């Protein structure tokens, strides 16, 4: 094969577009790659003047470059536009070399990416900006002459509109809460005047007439070549709800602290009020017996028996009232506990009864309460948190029943064995029921169907979280017009290992309630100390002191005390301090301490009571428990 033939084959098969131009600019030869590049056939191009295919603006440049190249030889580059077969213009880079004879020009041609036009750049910029605001998490709209000319999807969703066409052309005042209209009008005037309308909270109206809170800013812009205002807004409803809930939590913590302090302050006077009432009723009973024997009760005599019965009735009513106050103070402990969650075996009926008592005022005017308690094992839970859950469910049940028809409705509390060895608690009402479209969302945080200001939507979500954290579950079944049932499932407490059988032992001696003992009573409230001394009665020799300092003096005086009733919390030297000093000097005597607590504990007091094995009595006193504990201490001497 000759060299000329090989060169021609290389020309034909080269992947690079190659052409040969005559000195007058005609196209003499082109390879297949060139034909593919411009879309013309070889026959259509051969011996055709290039001026017919070169862009008119580039013809002069090509002519001058060809003349200079043919005259001087060498190499030259050129960029020009070539008309393709489909009528489009393709920008090409020409690398040209003159032949040895100076009558032909050999060209290697490559496509040249045309620089983007200003119009194309602006178009792309506009598209990018449109995508940005269309996908922005903030609601954005543009208005001119107080009418919408653009609204992004986020705003449409927040306002409850399906398509932008529902807003475009409409007045912007239609989405503003009536109470904020004057404020928004001032802000629009500011923005239209060319100044920024700064960030401000505005209430927006949804399509359905409800409103939401949004932070909004107005910016003067040029839109489609004319002055307009772009408004960016962010829905802050959930953030405000969360802030409100944090404030509510703070108030609940404060309420718990106040409940603990108030309970402690009430317990002290309540202790001696109840003790004195007991003593007064006992005295009235003795007086009645003595008068029966010594004073006849008949015509012509003082009607002492009637007066005595009326006085006894008054004392009994006062005693019942004091008992109710005592029960209220004890119930306050469930909301005043500020320690960390403490799980232990719990009889589920106890926090349930507490919740029923706390909700009684809300229940009695709405429905009859039905309690069905089946035998169930203890559950492993925190009693105060269970009380919180049950109280919320009971209040919700009451609110689901219209007021004024209590005899026609009922709220049922059913404790029963649950599936898989769990314990189930049903709280059912005969109220209005929950709509099917609402039912799937009732445990969602912040979801509520109550009017603004009457509910945060957190009650059921907190209940759900508390029960799930305990390893249980809470479910709901509801029918409109028939009522709702919430079912709480709780894991049972693990069984404690049974102790190994021990040889039969002699029964423990019964409490020594008849033996006379030397008893020390320590309490910083003198009436409490005196009432406790009266309860202990003449059977024992009782010494009462009113401070830790006096207690240490009495305990180190050499008097052989058989039992010590000691108030836990006292100013100065506390009951804990007295106990620790006695334990070091006389361990045997320290075991005969019986602690009196008023219900308000510091962290140290709580840890102390958990650590020491001594008996504990809560104020107000249980008289029977006082005699029982004293008898046990005296019997163990």
Image: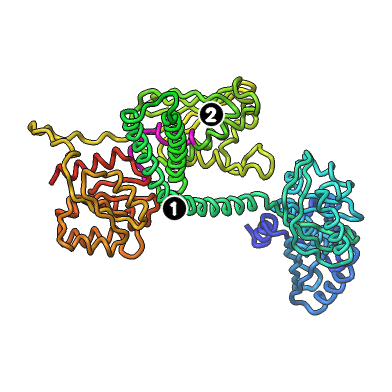
Is residue 28 visible in the rendered image? The answer is no
| Nearest to the observer: residue 300 or residue 41 | 300
Where residue 53 sits, quadrant-wise, is: bottom right
Q: Residue at x 55, y 41 (%)?
A: 459
Q: Name the residue nearer the viewer: 267 or 38.
A: 267
Element assignment for label 2 = strand
Left or right side of 412 for 608: left
Question: Which percent across, then down, holds residue 9?
Answer: 67, 56
Would you call the spot at circle 1 few (<14 residues within 10 Å), some (14-19), or many (20 or more)? some
Indicate left or right for 602 with 183 as reference.
Answer: left
Image: magenta residue range? 342-357
Foreground: 235 or 281?
281
Query: Mark 1 and 2 residues: CB-CB less than 8 Å, in contact?
Result: no
In percent of width and height, residue 183 lies at: 83, 58
Q: Determine which quarter of the picture holds residue 184.
A: bottom right
Instruction: Please give the name of the residue rendered at 89% of the width and 70% of the height, measured from the top-left corner.
Output: 60
Tell whether 588 sits left or right of 178.
left
Q: Earlier in the sequence, mark 1 or mark 2?
A: 1
Q: Is residue 458 magenta?
A: no
Which part of the image, by quadrant, shows the N terminus? bottom right
Residue 256 or residue 317, whichever sits in front = 317
Residue 408 higher or lower than 137, as above or below: above
State the mark number for residue 265.
Answer: 1
Residue 555 lies in quadrant:
bottom left
Identify the mark at residue 476; answer none if there is no mark.
Answer: 2
């Amino acid at each position: 094969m000759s060299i000329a033939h090989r060169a021609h084959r290389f020309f034909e098969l080269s992947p690079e577009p190659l052409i040969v131009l005559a000195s007058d600019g005609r196209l003499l030869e082109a390879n297949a790659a060139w034909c593919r590049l411009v879309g013309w056939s070889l026959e259509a191009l051969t011996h055709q003047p290039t001026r017919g295919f070169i862009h008119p603006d580039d013809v002069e440049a090509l002519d001058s470059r060809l003349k200079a190249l043919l005259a001087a030889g060498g190499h030259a580059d050129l960029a020009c536009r070539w008309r393709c077969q489909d009528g489009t213009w393709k920008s090409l880079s020409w690398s040209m070399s003159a032949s040895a004879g100076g009558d032909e020009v050999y060209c290697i041609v490559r496509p040249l990416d045309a620089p983007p036009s200003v119009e194309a750049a602006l178009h792309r910029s506009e598209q990018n900006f449109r995508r940005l605001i269309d996908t922005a998490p903030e609601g954005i709209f543009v208005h001119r002459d107080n009418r919408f000319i653009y609204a992004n999807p986020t705003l449409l969703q927040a306002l409850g509109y399906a398509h932008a066409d529902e807003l475009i052309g409409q007045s912007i005042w239609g989405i503003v809460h009536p109470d904020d209209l004057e404020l928004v009008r001032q802000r629009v005037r500011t923005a239209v005047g060319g100044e920024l309308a700064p960030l401000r909270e505005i209430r927006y109206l949804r399509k359905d007439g409800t409103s939401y809170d949004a932070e909004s800013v107005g910016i003067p812009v040029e839109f489609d070549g004319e002055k307009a205002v772009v408004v960016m807004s962010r829905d802050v409803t959930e953030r405000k709800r969360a802030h409100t809930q944090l404030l509510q939590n703070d108030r609940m913590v404060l309420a718990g602290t106040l409940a603990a302090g108030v309970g402690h302050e009430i317990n002290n006077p309540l202790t001696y009020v109840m003790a004195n009432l007991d003593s007064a009723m006992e005295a009235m009973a003795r007086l009645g017996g003595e008068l029966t024997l010594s004073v006849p009760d008949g015509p012509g005599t003082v009607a002492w028996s009637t007066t005595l019965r009326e006085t006894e009735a008054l004392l009994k009513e006062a005693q019942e009232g004091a008992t109710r106050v005592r029960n209220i103070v004890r119930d306050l402990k469930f909301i005043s506990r500020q320690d960390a969650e403490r799980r232990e075996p719990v009889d589920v009926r106890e926090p349930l009864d507490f919740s029923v008592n706390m909700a009684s005022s809300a229940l009695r005017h709405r429905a009859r309460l039905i309690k069905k308690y089946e035998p169930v094992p203890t559950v492993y839970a925190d009693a105060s948190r269970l009380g919180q859950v049950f109280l919320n469910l009971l209040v919700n049940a009451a609110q689901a029943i219209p007021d004024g028809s209590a005899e026609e409705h009922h709220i049922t509390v059913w404790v029963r064995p649950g599936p898989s060895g769990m314990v189930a608690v049903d709280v059912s009402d005969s109220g209005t029921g929950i709509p099917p479209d609402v039912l799937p969302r009732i445990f969602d945080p912040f979801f509520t169907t109550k009017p603004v200001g009457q509910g945060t939507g957190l009650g059921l979500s907190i209940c759900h979280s508390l029960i799930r954290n305990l390893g249980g579950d809470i479910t709901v079944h509801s029918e409109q017009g028939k009522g709702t049932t919430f079912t709480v499932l709780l894991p049972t407490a693990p069984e404690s290992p049974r102790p190994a059988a021990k040889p039969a032992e002699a029964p423990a001696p019964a409490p020594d309630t008849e033996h006379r003992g030397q008893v020390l009573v320590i309490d910083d409230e003198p009436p409490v100390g005196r009432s406790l001394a009266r309860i202990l009665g003449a059977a024992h020799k009782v010494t009462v002191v009113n401070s830790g300092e006096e207690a240490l003096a009495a305990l180190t005086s050499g008097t052989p005390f058989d039992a010590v009733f000691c108030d836990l919390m006292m100013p100065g030297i506390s009951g804990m301090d007295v106990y620790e000093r006695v334990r070091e000097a006389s361990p045997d005597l320290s075991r005969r301490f019986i602690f009196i607590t008023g219900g308000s504990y510091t962290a140290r007091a709580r840890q102390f009571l958990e650590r020491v094995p001594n008996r504990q009595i809560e104020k107000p006193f249980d008289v029977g428990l006082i005699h029982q504990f004293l008898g046990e201490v005296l019997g163990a001497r």
